[in-house]
Amino acid sequence: MFTHSSKNVFQVKLKKFKQFLQQMYGILSDLLKKLLRCLEIGLDLPFGTLLDQHTNINSESSVTALRLIHYPPILFEVPENCIRCGEHTDYGTVTLLFQDNIGGLEVKNRNNEWVQAHPVPGAILVNVGDMLQTLTSGRLVATPHRVLIPEEERLKRCSRKSVAFFVNPNKKVVLKPFGAPEDDKKSYKTSHEHLHSRLSSALILKP
């Protein structure tokens, strides 16, 4: 039960934590601009091609999200073939991921082999998402990944924490591949339509 004093301390800490996360969101937004520019150069795209599709990430209407992810410690016998997070690709443009030293993340390479993505101190792991794969016509492939339960008992009994910055284009961006003919009559989804479709299939959302 909280006392009046402890409630005040908690509220102060919560306010500071919120401010920290807001500051982190801003720093990651600035970093993202540099990353998108690097991608434009690497893909030989005109300046602003990707940047212009991500102008709303700091607005209230943005679906770009900073998520704090917690995997609880496992203090019981685990049935065979259980994992912490099943195989999937991220839905958006890119994901910037920070992970602790517990490990367990694996990514699938182009030979269809699972490779451990060992935590590297001070490093940010960058995942390509579905929308960037579509925009680049598969030149950049969305990264299938999963999170396994550590085999080592000591690590299994530790909680695992990660922070993910899920980047999505502006809602009205049409996911038409770069270089597609201007008179292309194919029906392309918008960023918002793709995201809603993926979330609906994963979470069974109502329209």
Image (tube, rainbow, N blue to C red):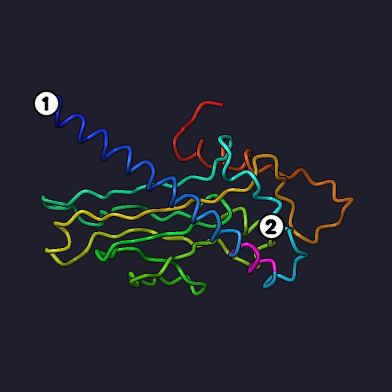
- Which of pointers 2 and 1 lies earlier in the amino acid sequence? 1
The quarter of the picture where residue 139 lies is bottom right
Q: Position of residue 197 (x, y in %)?
A: 57, 39
Q: Please name the predominant secondary structure of the magenta segment in the image.
A: helix
Placement of the N terminus among the 4 image quadrants? top left
Q: Position of residue 49 (x, y in %)?
A: 74, 58
Rendered image: mark on residue 56: none
Q: Residue at x 21, y 48 (%)?
A: 72
Q: Position of residue 50 (x, y in %)?
A: 69, 57
Label 2 Cα neighbours within 10 Å, binned few <14 / some 14-19 / many ≥20: many
Q: Amino acid at mark 2?
A: Leu
Q: Residue at x 49, y 64 (%)?
A: 126
Q: Residue at x 24, y 64 (%)?
A: 102
Please identify, in this view, whether the residue under mark 2 or under mark 1 is nearer the observer.
Answer: 1
User: Is residue 61 part of the magenta span, yes or no?
Assistant: no
Find numbered disc 2 in the image and state the secondary structure of the residue it sits on.
loop
Find numbered disc 1 in the image and state the secondary structure of the residue it sits on.
loop
Rendered image: mark on residue 3: 1
Q: Is residue 40 above or below residue 21?
A: below
Label 1 Cα neighbours within 10 Å, binned few <14 / some 14-19 / many ≥20: few
- Please give left or right for residue 182 compared with residue 101 in the image: right
The quarter of the picture where residue 87 lies is bottom left
Rendered image: mark on residue 50: 2
- Please give left or right for residue 195 compared with residue 180 in the image: left
Determine whether label 2 and label 1 are within 8 Å by CB: no
The quarter of the picture where residue 51 lies is bottom right
Q: Position of residue 122 (x, y in %)?
A: 37, 70
Residue 136 or residue 52, whichever sits in front: 52
Q: Residue at x 33, y 37 (%)?
A: 15
Q: Which residues are magenta?
A: 35-40
Q: Amino acid at mark 1?
A: Thr
